[in-house]
Amino acid sequence: MNFNNFPKIRMRRNRFKSFSRKLIEENQLSVNDLIYPIFVTYGKNKKEPIKEMPNLFRYSLDMFEKEIYRIKLLKIPAIAIFPKIENDKKDEKGSEALNKNNLICKAIKIVKSISTEIGVICDVALDPYTNHGHDGVLINGDVDNDETLKVLESQALVQAEAGCDILAPSDMMDGRVGVIRDCLEKNGFVNTQIMSYAAKYASSFYGPFRSAVGSSGTLLGQGKDSYQMDFRNSDEALKEVKLDISEGADMIIVKPGLPYLDVIYKIKNNLNIPIFAYQVSGEYSMLMSAINNNWLDKKVIYETLICFKRAGCNGILTYFAPEIATLLHQK
Ligand code: PBG
């Protein structure tokens, strides 16, 4: 080994003083990078704790309203809303997704009545609405791609009509972005954006989310492996992203987040598009359980979010959004 550069080069020199570390820093996190996923439910005056996700709640619409005022004050640019509907409204086909007056449509309107500034993102997928918990229509025990597209198209339109700013197809059906984009254009929603979950893996990290929206108990057979991506693959992720972009997606999501930074980095190095990571429910639960046991310092949250930026993300969907926004405002 050649040590000739030492002591001419001392990497620690730049790290020695705080001002210097500030000058050297390559990545930053701002409130503008945050998207807050939030759960709504039926009924009144409800703020139900989600067992697997400490400090997070399912809000009935009246309580949701209050939460939106908090988000507005914190200046978080966008929220993603997820519904937990009554069990007796669920059926084979997820029909409630097409009800123009369903929980999610009401929630969208509430946000819009409080603030025109907050961007509203809604999933396009049927899992909160089906009695089997799958994202699409089951035929012979598997989710049928083309039949599902027909329903997703209508679901997307219902949500756009209710005022949703960004549709986020999270179903992983082939061709869904193209079908939704065409439908939006035909119906005059030319500025409704599509943020597709392009690289969405079949992951056990979604467990707490499924319990939050009440879609876990029923999921049969091979889970979602026949439509969500195999976590052994990453070339495929690039192909999924390219397809979604060519079909009209404006931006894309990689999901889960932290264990998939290589996927984010790969996309960033190959394509010039806005990339978002979803720091999913299981990641939140892992961090929170360690933090609540004093096994990890809270500062780990900020660190994970910077890691997403370093890997190449424009922004992050994270359940920590309010907490981190508060921290960033204090800085
Ligand atoms: C629905 C959907 C899921 C998540 C977001 N949208 C679960 C799934 O695909 O089973 C997971 C989010 C999280 O775990 O935080 N398609």
Image (cartoon, grey):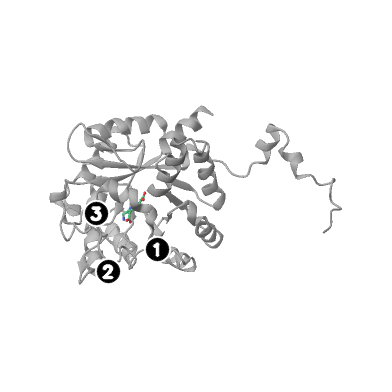
323 with respect to 81 (left or right): right
Give the CA distance from mark 1 to mark 3. 31 Å
Q: Judge left or right: residue 173 versus residue 23.
A: left
Image coordinates of residue 317 in percent, x first then y, are 41, 46
What residue does disc 2 label? 145
Q: Find residue 257 and report its horizontal and vertical position in percent.
A: 46, 52
Q: Nearer the viewer, mark 1 or mark 3?
A: 3
Instruction: Classify 10 Å Cα crowding around label 2: few (below 14), some (14-19), many (20 and above).
Output: some
Q: Can residue 330 be seen at all in this image of the molecule?
A: yes
Is tag 2's residue or tag 1's residue first in the polypeptide sequence?
Answer: 2
Horizontal and vertical percent position of residue 17: 72, 33
Q: Is mark 2 within 8 Å of ligand 1?
A: no
Residue 193 seen in the figure: no
Q: From mark 2 to mark 1, how far is it between C-alphas?
A: 16 Å
- Counting residues from the start of the chain, the first of labels 3 and 2 encountered is 2
Answer with the quarter of the image where residue 266 lies: bottom right
Q: What is the secondary structure assignment of the residue under circle 2?
A: helix
Q: Position of residue 86 (x, y in %)?
A: 16, 46
The residue lying toward the viewer, choosing from 237 and 282, is: 282
Residue shown at 51% from the left, 55% from the top: 261
Q: Mark 2 or 1, which is nearer the eye?
A: 2
Which residue position holds label 1?
A: 244
Q: Verify CB contact (< 8 Å) between mark 1 and mark 3.
A: no
Q: Amino acid at mark 1?
A: Asp
How packed mark 3 is, by other alpha carbons closer than 10 Å (few <14, some 14-19, many 20 or more), is few
Residue at image mark 3: 217
Q: Which residue, as the protein is rendered here, is positioned at the far bottom?
A: 140
